[in-house]
Amino acid sequence: MIMKAEKFYSLSDLWKNIKKLPQKRKYICGGTDIAVSLKYGSLDIDCLIDISDVKELSLIKKEKNHVFIGAGVKISEFEKNEIIKKCVPALYKSVRYYASPTIRNIATLGGNLANASPCADGVLALLASRAKVILNLYGKKRVLEIKDVFIGPKKTSIKKDELIEGFLVPIWSHKSVFLKSIPRKIFGISKAGLCVCADIKNGSVRDISISASSVGPVVLRCLKTETFLKGKEINDKTVEESYKIIKTEVSPINDHRSVAEYRKEIIGVFLKRALSSLK
Ligand SMILES: Cc1cc2nc3c(=O)[nH]c(=O)nc-3n(C[C@H](O)[C@H](O)[C@H](O)COP(=O)(O)OP(=O)(O)OC[C@H]3O[C@@H](n4cnc5c(N)ncnc54)[C@H](O)[C@@H]3O)c2cc1C
């Protein structure tokens, strides 16, 4: 049973008081993942630290070479924000696939990363956008590649009390495609997902990054496929070859949502669709 819940409105206040809280403590932001764990009794904690109104976590700022996105920005905000629409199109496009409007209005990107699910839609968009994550522990910051946060499904290298402060997303010339296979017509956890960000000029790939979800223990970058496509003209031959390569990069499993064979195939098909719409 949770004995205590404490709410903070600024980072300075959080760092000043956090060590006085009960030892078994955990952050809560939107609460959409935590609520499920609490319901099923899989959390052993004495204290929830509510960071949903910490002001530094709710910012979206455009700087010279990157966009800063606070970990506590609500998912629905990405669809309304002009900076995100223009500079981080993958995140903008991911919103309509992300749960239901009710969940989107409270869920956050920080929670999506910390939860480390292989199906996380926000992480899928961030990885293809080449974002880095800013972690903050008692005021000391470190910046990590998103891939370095994951140890395995639902496991991260984030330390006790370490806070995801936000994300740094580089500004680079690209368009993006976000595709997700779901069990129902709208909403739902992904059977498989693919996000492609690419700079394509006159039908040739100048730069590209590709991420895939629900087809491995964590959301992953498809580096072999990216390397193959860089510098190539998009034609029937390169599309067919990249379709074969990407299927060797994923390692899906059978579970209650789908089967490995379908997941592998749909990732290849999604890549074909993405390339033809981007060229
Ligand atoms: C009905 C339903 C549908 C869903 N559909 C989708 C979907 O379509 N796609 C999808 O990707 N996800 C989906 N989810 C999962 C969930 O909504 C997302 O993972 C969401 O982004 C989590 O954010 P949150 O703020 O609610 O996290 P919370 O529940 O508040 O926290 C989740 C975890 O992150 C930690 N945490 C939160 N913020 C921080 C921070 N800033 N720093 C450090 N740790 C932090 C918490 O301690 C906790 O361990 C769904 C969930 C539900 C209940």
Image (cartoon, helix red, strand yellow):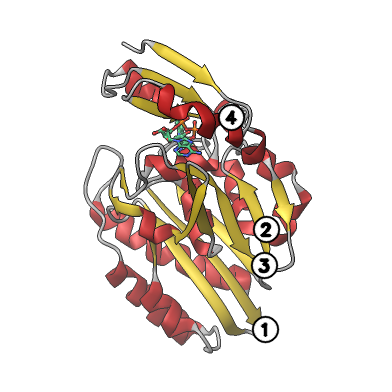
Alpha carbon distance from label 3 to label 1: 17 Å
Q: Is residue 146 left or right of residue 233?
A: left
Please tell me how crowded label 3 is: few (under 14), some (14-19), or many (20+) other residues with Cα within 10 Å.
Answer: some
Q: What residue sits 51% from the left and 63% below the top?
A: 128
Name the amino acid type tagged 3.
Ile
Please tell me how crowded label 1 is: few (under 14), some (14-19), or many (20+) other residues with Cα within 10 Å.
Answer: few
Alpha carbon distance from label 4 to label 3: 32 Å
Dots 4, 3 in contact, CB < 8 A: no
Residue 201 — which label?
1
Residue with the mark numbered 3: 171
Q: What residue sits 61% from the left and 39% below the top?
A: 57
Dots 2, 3 in contact, CB < 8 A: yes
Alpha carbon distance from label 1 to label 4: 49 Å
Callout in the foreground (2, 1):
2
SS class, disc 3: loop
Q: Is residue 219 visible?
A: no
Residue 67 — which label?
2
